[in-house]
Image: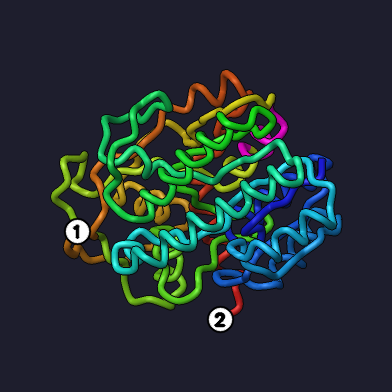
Amino acid sequence: MNILVTGGAGYIGSHTCVALLEAGHSVIVLDNLSNSNYEVINKIQHLSGKEITFYEMDVTDPLAVSRVFQRHELDGVIHFAGLKAVGESVENPLIYYKNNLVGTLVLAEACLKYHVGRFVFSSSATVYGDNQVPFVESMELLPTTNPYGETKAMSERMLLDISKANSDFAVTLLRYFNPVGAHESGIIGEAPDGMPNNLMPYITKVAKGKLKLLRIFGKDYPTVDGTGVRDYIHVLDLADGHVAAIEGLFKGVNIYNLGTGKGTSVLELLKAFEQANNHVIPYEIVERRPGDIALCYANASKAEQELGWKAKRDLISMCRDAWRFEKNLKD
């Protein structure tokens, strides 16, 4: 299939592009490079041994997006492009609503106009809000605790309504949890611009000496050790989940959690990193971060039953691969 991947130069998008190419699909990437760089495109091609078509453009630009749909006979779209920092969304909600919602609408409109019937949306466990764990797909979505999560929930509802009104527009919503790790080659991985927003790249920056110590946001949650609990999933498992989704039987709307089904606290992840890489990470406890919840982990049985997908890689592998990539990064 010919697959358009928006945000394909980003962390999850780049790993999914490699997985798609290795599975025999053709890939067209659309990315504005706001949190990535063109060198990632070259790395994707190096790892896969195949060429991809790349467009540097913003997914919120309807004319630019339309030109891409005109030039290629697309079979499906995987939509990653969007702003994704929880804390930043609390500080700048308008930017998040404008960018994330408009981008989804522009792509959906293009799919209807050019008869592209497969749409995989990069959603998030944040749509569950502060719900009862483990999260299951049948749960009613709660008001989320931050604007980032709201943009994901609102995008889901928009796509659901559009699919209901257009029987030839099928949507798969992938609610995934906390991706970590990197390609086992160490060539691509999570490399955020500026200060990391996610836990693992923060840990690896401390391990490398680029940051003095790790800040842990809160130690008074009702969890095993007082720190927040999340479902950490290897980015390669997540990429495989997207391939399974785009290749799956498409009809109506399908919703899947992509996670391991296991909750891991911040301190447990820190200890796993130290064990995997024989590297002590200094840290300090600071106040809770706005928008965070105590517990977040998945029931991922539906994806296994219907897509034949299951997370395979363990926490130690996630930590080793993340550190390998960080060591290979040029400072």
Question: Residue beneath label 2, please?
Answer: 331
Residue 9, horizontal then vertical, whole percent: 65, 62
Query: Would you say residue 244 sits in the magenta stretch?
Result: yes
In the visual, does 55 lie left or right of 26? left
Circle 2 packing at 10 Å, graded few (<14), some (14-19), many (20+), is few
* Rendered view: 245 above or below 291: above
Q: Which residue is mark 1?
A: 288
Q: Is residue 83 in sight in this rendering?
A: yes
Q: Residue at x 81, y 61 (%)?
A: 53
Which quadrant of the figure has residue 191? bottom right
> Magenta span has 13?
no
Q: Amino acid at mark 1?
A: Arg
Instruction: Find out whether the residues at labels 1 and 2 contact each other: C-beta distance under 8 Å.
Output: no
**Left or right: 6 in relation to 277:** right
Residue plotted at (40% across, 41% down)? 125
Camera-nearest residue between 292 and 208: 292
Taking depth in this image into account, of 312 and 148 the one nearest to the observer is 148
Residue 59, how many percent across, how many down?
Answer: 61, 61
- The C terminus lies in quadrant: bottom right
Percent coordinates x, y for residue 286 in the rendering = 19, 65
In whole angstroms, how far apart are the C-alphas of marks 1 and 2? 30 Å
Q: Which mark is residue 131?
A: none
- Residue depicted at x 47% and y 51%: 276
Assign a secondary structure to mark 2.
loop
**Residue stretch rendered in magenta on the structure:** 241-248
Upstream in sequence: badge 1 or badge 2: 1
